[in-house]
């Protein structure tokens, strides 16, 4: 049972590790508030701006910054938002209706809090920028539109 024990140890150590810059972004498949399935790995080859959110004002601000960048049309990137708190579709939709800037990117619900676990989220919001190879190139909390743009430009070169 020694080898099985080692495998188990490695498995659990890995599960609790926080995926940081330079690590592969953990894959996930979730359903958006409008019922579309989204899988992170499907966007291989594209830069992905991933926002991990709760229902909160700082999260609303962050999603708005992402949306403003998307609306400008200056960057080639996929924008995804995830409610990581297990909130219901109805609650998330009600929250999204309060936004002054309408969010058009997929906004995903995660009843099992799978993404929260995989990404070991501590900060509200958490923002990740993932390159075309699926590697995390930026991980931060509240990041302005210009800050996001600068990070995307670093990767796009």
Image (cartoon, rainbow, N blue to C red):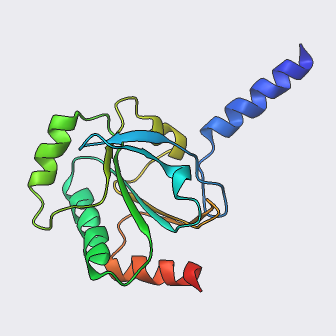
In the image, 24: left or right of 103? right
Q: Residue at x 60, y 52 (%)?
A: 19
Q: Is residue 10 depicted above or below 142 in this figure?
A: above
Q: Quadrant of residue 51?
A: bottom left
70 displayed left or right of 134: left
Q: Position of residue 114 (x, y in %)?
A: 46, 35
Q: Is residue 31 left or right of residue 6?
A: left
Q: Nearer the viewer, residue 40 or 147?
A: 40
Q: Position of residue 120 (x, y in %)?
A: 51, 44
Asked if 110 appears above or below 23 in the picture, the reply is above
The percent position of residue 124, horizontal first and vertical second, equals 34, 54
Q: Nearer the viewer, residue 81 or 146?
A: 81
| Above or below, 62 relative to 29 | below
Image point (59%, 65%), residue name: 45
Q: Residue at x 70, y 36 (%)?
A: 13
Give me the residue at 36% from left, 83% from top: 146
Q: Quadrant of the N terminus?
A: top right
């Amino acid at each position: 049972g020694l080898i099985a024990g080692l495998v188990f140890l490695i498995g659990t150590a890995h599960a609790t590790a926080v995926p940081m810059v330079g690590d592969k972004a953990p894959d996930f498949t979730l359903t958006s508030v409008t019922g579309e399935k989204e899988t992170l790995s499907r966007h291989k080859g594209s830069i992905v701006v991933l926002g991990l959110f709760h229902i909160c004002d700082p999260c609303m601000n962050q999603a708005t910054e992402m949306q403003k960048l998307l609306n400008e049309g200056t960057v080639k990137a996929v924008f995804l938002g995830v409610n990581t708190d297990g909130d219901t579709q109805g609650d998330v939709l009600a929250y999204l209706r309060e936004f002054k800037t309408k969010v058009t990117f997929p906004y995903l619900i995660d009843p099992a809090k799978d993404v929260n676990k995989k990404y070991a989220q501590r900060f509200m919001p958490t923002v990740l920028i993932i390159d075309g190879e699926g590697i995390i190139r930026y991980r931060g909390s509240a990041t302005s539109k210009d800050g996001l743009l600068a990070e995307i430009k670093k990767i796009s070169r």
